[in-house]
Image (tube, coloured by chain):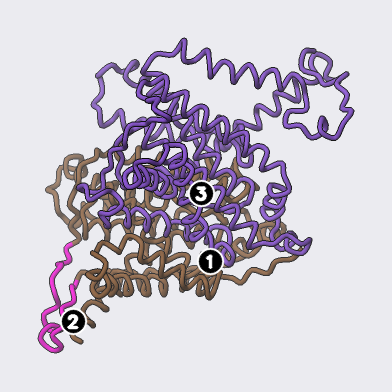
Amino acid sequence: MLYREAGQFKTSYGADQQIFPIRQDRIAMAAILAFFFVGVPLLANQYWLQAILVPVLIFSLAALGLNILTGYAGQLSLGTAAFMAVGAFAAYNFELRLPWMPLPVSFVLAGVVAAAVGMLFGLPSLRIKGFYLAVATLAAQFFIVWVLTKFGWFSNYSSSGVITTQKMQILGYAFDTPVRQYLLVLTIVAVMAMLAKNLVRSSTGRAWMAVRDMDVAAEVIGIRLMHTKLLAFAVSSFYCGVAGALYAYAYLGTVEPEGFNLDMSFRVLFMIIIGGVGSILGSFLGAAFIVLAPIFLNVTAHGLFAGNIPAGLASNLELIVFGGLIIFFLIVEPHGLARLWQIAKEKLRLWPFPY
Amino acid sequence: MQFFFEVLIGGLLSGVLYALVALGFVLIYKASGVFNFAQGAMVFFAALTFVGFQEVLPGWLGVEPGGAAVFWLALILACLAMVVLSIATERIVLRPLVNQPQITLFMATIGLAFFIEGLAQGIWGANVRGLELGIQDEPIAWMAERTGIFISSFDVFAAVVAGVLVAVLAVFFNRTRVGRALRAVADDHQAALSIGIPLQVIWRIVWAVAGFVALVAGLIWGARNGVQFALTFTALKALPVLILGGFESVPGAIVGGLIIGASEKLAEVYLGPMVGGGIDSWFPYFMALLFLLVRPEGLFGERHIDRV
């Protein structure tokens, strides 16, 4: 009854094309944003902000990047973590070598560097498809981590490539408390998510989807394959790069190339599969699930067994449950959490008279 | 030159080991179109189960450890465990996911990999164990005397095992009823179903055979490096072999393994020092990429024809 578009007439092209056509959606969106911008900093404690909300947001951004590439443009990639590493190390080097550079500019430039690297490793996609491409992107994963570890210049010659990020400061305002860091991350993520949402509704996004659904057909109707695929790689890597920079600056503070390993790439891939391939909302839901599930499992395991079983067994149980959960989710809802939300919305629109 | 050949042959023989793991991937991909990332975990599970049975069996049966009876019994039990695992996988994971896109199945196998890793370590513990096959890892004496090239007898043994395995698989695929059914399923699921081939039975068989291949690979890798968690990373070694050889081709897995093994070792020795070493983590992938740029479906893969 509440969620219904009846009576909302669109009288201009602008109104017809707006990002949330239904008024209730706009209200809900505003409420969610207000909650996360105002409510959360007031309510959440330091642990929640630092250990849960910030990583969820950062991984959402990375998942968003991968979703653009895999979900919208259909190019399967297993090198996400490597592109994040490029972003993190690029931002570090910009700040280190050009200290006058404002932080937001180095973040953007870090994204641009990641985009360039992503385009380079996206070149094989012009010839290779499907799983062959997925394995080819593993080359990026291993090569980039190797380069960052091997050549000391990238980490300012610290041992084993560990970097400790500079203090975050914008126009003399230091982002040194968890609340400020959270707000900074939230702002960046919100802006970039809005951009992504608009991008995938644009002609670029439609070209991506055409390529995803069938690239030969897309080429026949006049979409430039090379341009489209490389753009997808660039935009996706840009998002991953910024996410990587945030991961280093706002979350951990100290990172090493080995931290951006294949495991992390898989985790981001899990996020978009669980959340929903080809869905902006899904990136957020998936990231929340994948970041929270291990924490939740850990806490429950401790609560249930309370030291009765050895730590090794508990961690193995976690592996089993995590693996089982992923399989379970894929079986129950192969289209991800975002689809569940969509179904709920459809039901809600007809409620309480579904016939 | 002698050194070159030594490196080359060493590389070829280690390539055989990669090919063994790749073989398991190929079998499953051929028959069910599933890119089975859990193959590495299966290798780990198989090896760990074998070693675990070898440890507990003497206690159960009251015989002394290290005997031939224990070895064979452990082998049979490990085989059975792989069969049970395969059937359970087919029933619980694959059957509900029929007709899903390939990426979903791929993700499911990653989940499966987590599950199997946890299961294996949960049952048998996470200690690193040695595995004794009774083959010495020493250079063959007469070879070293005649040509001055040092080749480990263990590597040769592994190569022979791989050769026998491939031969057996070839006979199985080409000369038996079940093998023909397997090839029919690989060719076209629906056509195979329509002429009365039970798809699910075939899938179980394929997964069991892949489990058996994983057991062989696990035994050889385990005897080489010890049975430990790192065995799961053999899957990563097998991936470049796969894309080089083509996902659907058994000979491709062998040839790809040889090329990757040889080029990896040669590059590590001759190219490595120039850039600071440690290049074996990514070099095989680059190698495979170069091949792919010429032949996008791998050396022996099926050529895809796109129809609009």
Proximity of marks 3 and 1: CB atoms separated by less than 8 Å: no
Q: Which chain is purple?
A: A
Horizontal relation, residue B270 to residue A12: left or right: left
Q: Is residue A132 visible?
A: yes
Q: Chain of mark 3?
A: A
- The disc labelled 2 sits on which kind of residue? Phe
Horizontal relation, residue B234 to residue B156: left or right: right
Q: Residue furthest bottom?
A: B146
Question: Mark 1 = which residue?
Answer: B248
Q: Nearer the viewer, residue A49 or A135?
A: A49
- A99 shown above or below B254: above
The spot of residue B146 in percent (x, y) is 13, 89
At mark 2, the secondary structure is: helix
- A283 shown above or below B244: above
Q: Chain of mark 2?
A: B
Task: Tell me how far mark 3 sits from mark 2, CA to CA.
Answer: 43 Å
Magenta stretch?
A: B134-153
Q: Nearer the viewer, residue B268 or B44?
A: B268
The spot of residue B79 in percent (x, y) is 36, 52
At mark 1, the secondary structure is: loop
Q: Which chain is brown?
A: B
* Residue pictured at 33% horizontal, 74% vertical: B263
Question: Mark 2 = which residue?
Answer: B3
Q: Is residue A267 visible?
A: no
Quadrant that contains the C terminus of chain A: top right
Question: Mark 3 = which residue?
Answer: A237
Q: Earlier in the sequence, mark 2 or mark 1?
A: 2
